[in-house]
């Protein structure tokens, strides 16, 4: 059923006004281009208005003729607009040339090009594009819950009660969870998790952190006033480094970081325009820290900067080593001797798997070395809700304990923290459960302990599985995974593959990891993103996937590596 063609536009309508465009453009000096633009725009606008004026049903002939008219008019208008010079154009204020060069220098390999490529491949899979795999497995980052780890029930119960206090009347929640939630809410403004907290964090949670540290360290005292709740450990590390970096030229602050390192450190150092001073972990000795290597690094650095900060990651990321007490004593003595401010990144303190290894906090060892050290060595240590058995990355909960800080610097630190108002209060509540879990005799203790031990024992089994399977592959060597959540195996890359990588303007291990992703769907991070000795190549892979999936991943890596060696032999 057809409708008559749409009625003609009235002379006073938009069509009658359109020629003004041509006159205006011509008068302004665009001449023929302006008139052509006007005519093309007039034709296109007339067709649109004709469509609007008509009814929804029309004859096939009208549709075909109008369709052709619209297509040619729109094409002509588009072409002419491209020809027309841009008027009143001005450059953008923020361009790659004008932006902060320190930000441009920042790199963060864990979420770098390899993850962007993984995202592209995921979209292609969703669109039905065929690949030699059906999913992308993101083994690039220590995100436990994304890999299928289940939350700790008690932690989620307390945070839920704090978030929605009406649940405090529900019989579905245990009393020990309710008691903790009431205590936290009582310390919050308006009894609400939605209120700002003090810049250092909720007072009762800081008290719980201090009590936890005392228990962990066998009675070594901890002062709540030295505790600062943070947005994950990263926030605390960044804040401390901001205060520490100063000077110019040869007096510019040098920051010693382990190589391989967690890329947060190099990123913050770049952003602050500080001087990165590398010290190399000993791969041949299970990634141990050698004080002689520290001494070499500091001696050389004094030629071009002022080494002032020593960063330690224990247990190690990405290398998984756990430092012995003797090593920690040597490091503390070295820091005291060289007057270095110590940063102890201890977020994996619950993740120790090797039977002959034990976590020792720098704070505890420092105090047990006597007052000459404990009263003088400045130390900031960090912990988080993101790792351990909790894996609560999204809450962004964490704390730092800073000791032996100058009183005036303490004021400056609080000032810096107050600029960002406070860390997320829900994350603070999650941190409270990490440091104040159920104890024997409480209703939730057995379930909490069972869930905690399941996660940690499962991680220990996967650490051993990963080490064993990697070491069965020709051209791959993996040190024992003593702790943390990652394997950092050394991979042999043939000369032809290195040449191919150069042709693609990639680091050899980036080329390797890209090929691995494109052919298997497995996303890992090249060792060059963490730093490594010249001529060696590595990759970092998390051990967090479920055991069966982890076996599949490792088998795929094995098959890929053998084919890679054959291709580039």
Image (cartoon, rainbow, N blue to C red):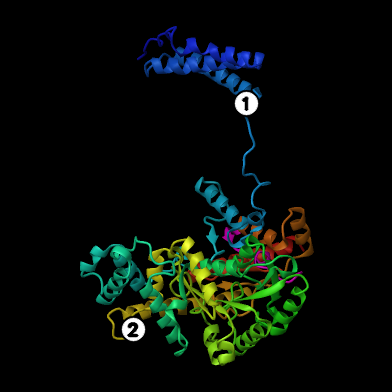
Crowd tier of the residue under label 1, counting other residues whose Cα lies within 10 Å: few below 14, some 14–19, many 20 or above = few
Can the viewer see residue 555? no
Residue in view at x 60 percent, y 16 percent: 25
Closest to the observer, 184 or 389 = 184
The image quadrant that residue 165 belongs to is bottom left
Q: How many marks?
A: 2
The image quadrant that residue 30 belongs to is top right
Query: Which element carries disc 1, helix, strand or loop?
Result: loop
Residue 532 is a magenta residue: yes
Residue 105 screen position, x and y as percent: 67, 57
Can the viewer see residue 111? yes
Closest to the observer, 10 or 419 = 419
Residue in view at x 36 percent, y 12 percent: 3
Spatial CA span between label 2 and label 1: 72 Å
Decide which of tag 2 and tag 1 comes sooner along the chain. 1
Task: Name the residue tied to disc 2.
Answer: 439
Using the image, determine if residue 334 lies above or below residue 543. Answer: below
Residue in view at x 70 percent, y 71 percent: 277
Left or right placement of residue 29 versus residue 9 in this view: right
- The magenta region covers 520-536
Residue 439 screen position, x and y as percent: 33, 83
Closest to the observer, 33 or 211 = 211
Task: Name the residue tied to disc 1.
Answer: 87
Using the image, determine if residue 312 lies above or below residue 230. Answer: below
């Amino acid at each position: 059923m057809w409708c008559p063609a749409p009625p003609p536009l009235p002379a006073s309508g938009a069509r009658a006004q359109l020629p003004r465009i041509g006159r205006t453009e011509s008068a302004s000096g665009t001449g023929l281009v302006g008139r052509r633009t006007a005519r093309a725009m007039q034709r296109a606008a007339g067709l649109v208005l004709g469509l609007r004026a008509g009814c929804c049903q029309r004859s096939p002939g009208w549709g075909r003729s109008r369709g052709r008219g619209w297509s040619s008019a729109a094409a002509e208008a588009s072409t002419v607009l491209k020809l027309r010079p841009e008027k009143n154009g001005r450059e953008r204020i923020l361009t790659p040339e004008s932006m902060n060069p320190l930000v441009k220098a920042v790199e963060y390999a864990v979420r770098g090009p390899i993850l962007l490529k993984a995202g592209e491949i995921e979209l292609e899979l969703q669109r039905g594009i065929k690949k030699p795999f059906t999913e992308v497995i993101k083994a690039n980052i220590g995100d436990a819950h994304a890999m299928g780890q289940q939350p700790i029930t008690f932690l989620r119960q307390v945070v839920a009660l704090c978030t929605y206090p009406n649940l405090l009347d529900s019989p579905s929640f245990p009393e020990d969870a309710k008691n903790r939630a009431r205590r936290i809410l009582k310390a919050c403004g308006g009894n609400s998790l939605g209120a700002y907290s003090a810049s250092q964090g909720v007072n009762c949670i800081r008290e719980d952190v201090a009590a936890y540290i005392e228990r962990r360290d066998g009675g070594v005292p901890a002062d709540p006033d030295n505790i600062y709740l943070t947005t994950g450990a990263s926030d605390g590390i960044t804040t401390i480094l901001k205060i520490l970096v100063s000077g110019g030229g040869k007096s510019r602050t040098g920051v010693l970081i382990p190589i391989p390192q967690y890329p947060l450190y190099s990123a913050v150092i770049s952003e602050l325009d500080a001087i990165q001073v590398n010290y190399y972990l000993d791969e041949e000795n299970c990634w141990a820290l050698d004080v002689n290597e520290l001494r070499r690094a500091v001696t050389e650095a004094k030629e071009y900067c002022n080494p002032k900060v020593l960063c330690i990651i224990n247990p190690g990321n990405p290398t998984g080593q756990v430092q012995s007490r003797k090593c920690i004593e040597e490091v503390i003595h070295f820091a005291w001797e060289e007057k270095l401010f110590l940063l102890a990144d201890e977020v994996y303190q619950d993740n120790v798997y090797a039977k002959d290894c034990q976590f020792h906090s720098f704070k505890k060892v420092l105090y047990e070395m006597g007052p000459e050290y404990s009263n003088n060595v400045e130390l900031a240590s960090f912990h988080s809700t993101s790792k351990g058995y909790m894996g609560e990355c999204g809450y962004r909960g964490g704390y730092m304990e800073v000791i032996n800080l100058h009183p005036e610097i303490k004021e400056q630190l609080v000032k810096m923290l107050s600029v960002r108002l406070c860390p997320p209060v829900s994350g603070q509540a999650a941190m409270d459960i990490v440091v104040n879990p159920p104890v024997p005799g409480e209703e939730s203790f057995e379930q909490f302990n069972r869930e905690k031990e399941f996660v940690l024992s499962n991680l220990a089994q996967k650490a051993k599985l990963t080490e064993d399977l990697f070491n069965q592959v020709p051209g791959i060597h993996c040190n024992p995974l003593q702790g943390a959540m990652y394997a950092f195996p050394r991979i042999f890359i043939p000369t032809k593959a290195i040449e191919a990588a150069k042709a693609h303007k990639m680091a050899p291990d980036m080329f390797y990891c890209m090929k691995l992703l494109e052919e298997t769907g497995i996303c890992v991070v090249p060792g060059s993103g963490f730093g490594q000795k010249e001529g060696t190549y590595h990759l970092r892979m998390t051990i967090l996937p479920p055991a069966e999936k982890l076996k599949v991943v490792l088998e795929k890596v094995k098959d890929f590596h053998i084919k890679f060696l054959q291709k580039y032999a």
